[in-house]
Amino acid sequence: MTGLGDQNRPRLIVDCDPGQDDAVALVVAGHYGELIGITTVGGNAPLADVTRNALLTCQLFGLDVPVYVGQARPLEAEPLHAPEIHGASGFDGPSLPELTKEPEATHAVEYLIETVRSEEGLWLIPIGPATNIATALRRAPDLADRLAGISFMGGSALGGNRTAAAEFNALADPEALAVVLECGAEIRMCGLDLTSQLVVDDALVADIRALTGTEAGRPVNPGAGVVADLFTSYLDRVEAIGGRRIGGLHDPCAVLAATHPELFDMVERPVGVELRGALTRGMTVVDTRFRRSALDTGIPWDDAGVFHPVRHCARLDAGEVRRLVVNALDELGSHARA
Ligand code: RIB
Ligand code: CA
């Protein structure tokens, strides 16, 4: 069986740590791909919180997709969270419905190994620390050859957000990202240099809030209302930190790089992740000196074996990507009954 579902929609497994941008990524994946499974990983908030948030997102948007709980801790680092961005719960801001959806009993890593071994051509979409994916690849290196690819949100070619050098997902588990980069599958990288081109601002919040309403006394698209409240709360925190109500809509980019690659400028370049630097641990180094042709001609670009060919997504069609995101929230949310 190939990884192409109905109408040639790629079959996806999203590995996430919701967070508001993860929630939108799940909706985008459910609308434009065949989202066959969701795995959760400790990241923006502790594992129990991000798992609850993933389950709530499925409820709010009618995503009938199994959720598998993964690793609470990185491969080697201490757990790192982002309450300053997502709030302590990972979903601070909106009032949320009662949780009714349950996670599956199978551990996320076992699910990943079993599922990729049973079906060729799947896309893995890690949008949090890459701990689950790396753990599965370490236990089953054969998975890499069976995948259509790994499209991840993480790293950056132009400086970090959690430190001056490192982006949050990469810094939270740099050892895991190194495992992913060297695994041999096709890797598509959506780093901050790309995802900052897809802007979260009050205009986007207004467009999303406009998807909600009431019909015959019943709320229409309550999920969009929750996303609008999550984004408003996010912008309030970002404004308190940096003085501006603007942020990047990071995680949906990794999904769309798999479902709509035509909207992205991708260049295969050597990429590595720093594991030891006192100032630079978790920094991703994107060697923009080379293009694929150079990689093939034996130029000595990697003496230490720490750089790996990665499809670096450098540019995106922001207008079309923004339209696709709002459309997915509208289409899925308006048919859901939370
Ligand atoms: O740096 C942005 C990334 O960190 C996103 O995946 C966001 O959800 C957080 O996990
Ligand atoms: Ca995330």
Image (cartoon, rainbow, N blue to C red):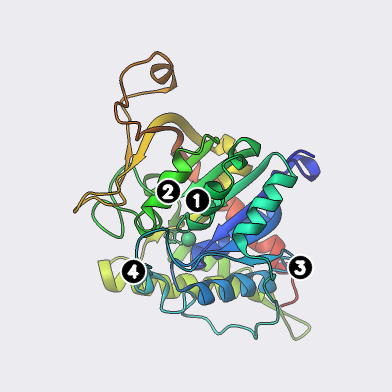
Decide if ligand 2 comes within 8 Å of the CB at mark 1: no
Q: Which residue is mark 4?
A: 238
Disc 1 vs disc 2: Cβ atoms closer than 8 Å? Answer: yes
Q: Which tag is nearer the camera, tag 2 or tag 4?
A: 2
Q: Nearer the viewer, residue 122 or 79?
A: 79
Decide if ligand 1 comes within 8 Å of the CB at mark 2: no
Q: Position of residue 164 (x, y in %)?
A: 23, 54
Q: Which residue is mark 2?
A: 177
Mark earlier in primary sequence (2, 3): 2
Mark earlier in primary sequence (1, 3): 1
- Dot 4 falls on a residue whose secondary structure is helix
Q: Amino acid at mark 2?
A: Leu
- Dot 2 falls on a residue whose secondary structure is helix
Quick check: can you spot residue 317?
Answer: yes
Q: Which tag is nearer the camera, tag 2 or tag 3?
A: 2
Name above or below for residue 234 compared with residue 313: below
Q: CA distance from mark 2 to mark 4?
A: 26 Å
Mark earlier in primary sequence (4, 3): 4
Q: Which tag is nearer the camera, tag 1 or tag 4?
A: 1
Q: Which residue is mark 1?
A: 134
Q: Which tag is nearer the camera, tag 1 or tag 3?
A: 1
Q: Which residue is mark 3?
A: 335
Q: Residue at x 37, y 74 (%)?
A: 83
